[in-house]
Structures are given as structure tokens and as C-alpha cells.
Image: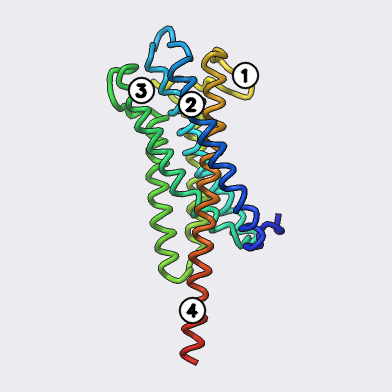
Amino acid sequence: MHGFANPARFLRIARWLMPLCLGAGIVIALAALGWGLFFAPAERLQGETVRIVYLHVPAAWLGMAGWSGIAIASFTELVWRHPLAGIAARACAVPGAVFTVVCLVTGSLWGRPAWGTWWVWDGRLTSMLVLLFLYFGWMALSQASEASDGAGTRAPAIFGLVGAVNIPIIHYSVIWWNSQHQPPSITTGGSAMSGAFLWPLLIAMTGFTLIFAGVVLARMRAILAHQQAEARLRRKALAQAG
């Protein structure tokens, strides 16, 4: 794993992997959304509103996956001082927050016809909103650390690990508490969904996951380029001062 810690080696891999992930992800996601919106059947009870699932569920999955990425990168940074760990955590934050917002918005649009209201203080919805606030807090802490020339970089990493406690709360909230949100339809034991809904959903999740990976790689490349440019400017300034 430390072989990929070399920024030059990582950039060589990311240079071809990033457009591959983005291109394949966009094609797959659009195909899955087209399938779900125009060809999949309406649900017996929810009717046409069930079509929101093909965007809502991938967004929820990637909102949680984004913070999981931050937590894993934070652990790697604290334990092994991996050179790219902090950069990976920063790269995951913005797309993770964006997908969390998409999840909350689509969930609200889905909840209005299903529950008769735009929002309820349900365990799943509330913990997902907490996740969004955690993203905002982490990004503010990371920016403050960066503004202090990298001093106190452990603080965002520790915050990333502590915030990971919310991920199992989101997942199990519909089981632990009396929830209006439906229980998980896809588990390790199988799926409660019909294949007519399940297959376009799984394909949509694959496509959006590839898009997420491509965006993270693009952000890591941009952060590395910014750091390298700043390092060159510092060396140049020191050389002129000397």
C-alpha cells in the first residue's frame, strides 16, 4: 500500500484512472436512470414516486461512503502517517457532502407524497442531517488547519474518526427506533425488492460510485498540484531572500 503513497506514482495512476471512472460512471448512471425512469414499472403502493429511489439510494450510500472514506483516511494518517491520507480525506469531503444534500432533498420530495409531509424528525432523516453538519464541521476544521500552514493536522483526522460513529447510527436507525422510514430493502441476506426495481438500482449505484471515485481522484490531483505549486513558490522565495 505504501507503494501508492508516492505522489508521482499516484499521479501516474490517477491520470488514466480518473477519466475512466468518470466516463464509465456517467454512461452507466445515465443508462440506469433512463431504465428506472422510463422502463421500470411503477410500484403497487407508491406509484410513480418510487422512481426517486434510483437517485435517492445511491446518494444516501455515497453520503455515508464519503464519510467512511474520511474515517479510513484519518485512521491511516494517524497510525501510518500515509502521505496521501490527508489529501484523500479532503478529496472525499465535498462530493460526500453534495451527495448527502441530494439524499436529503430527494428524501424530502419522496416523503411528501408518502408521508404527507416534507420532513419528520425520524431517526434516519435526523442522523443523515447530522452527517451533513459533520461534513460542514470537518471542512471548516480542515480549512482552518490548512490556513495555519498545516499545524494541528491531527484535529481533522480525530474529528473524522469520531464522526464515523454516526455511520452505523444512520444504518441501524430504522431498526433501533420506531421509524417512519422503511427498513433496509437490500441486506447481506438478500433483497426484499423485485428484480424489476433491484437491477436498475444496483446499476445506478455502480454508476454513481464510479462518478464519486472519479471526482475524488480529480480533487486529489488538484490538491496535490496546488501543494506542489505552493512548495515551488516557497523555494523560490527562500532562494531570492538568500
Determine which residue is flagged by label 1: 190
Look at mark 2 in the image and give the residue it sits on: 176
Q: Is residue 211 above or below residue 178?
A: below
Task: Please state which of the two labelled residues, at mark 4 or mark 3, is closer to the viewer.
Answer: 4
Residue position for label 3: 110
Q: Secondary structure at mark 2?
A: helix
Give the residue pinned by disc 4: 234
Front label number (4 vs 2): 4
Residue type at mark 1: give it: Gly
Q: Report, in whole angstroms, how far the alpha carbon at label 2 lies from the one at label 1.
A: 20 Å
Tag 3's secondary structure? helix
Give the quarter of the image for residue 126.
Answer: top left
Q: Amino acid at mark 3?
A: Trp
Q: Earlier in the sequence, mark 2 or mark 3?
A: 3
Task: Work out which residue is located at the far bottom of the displayed protein and give it.
Answer: 242
Point out the frontmost of discs 1 and 3. Answer: 3
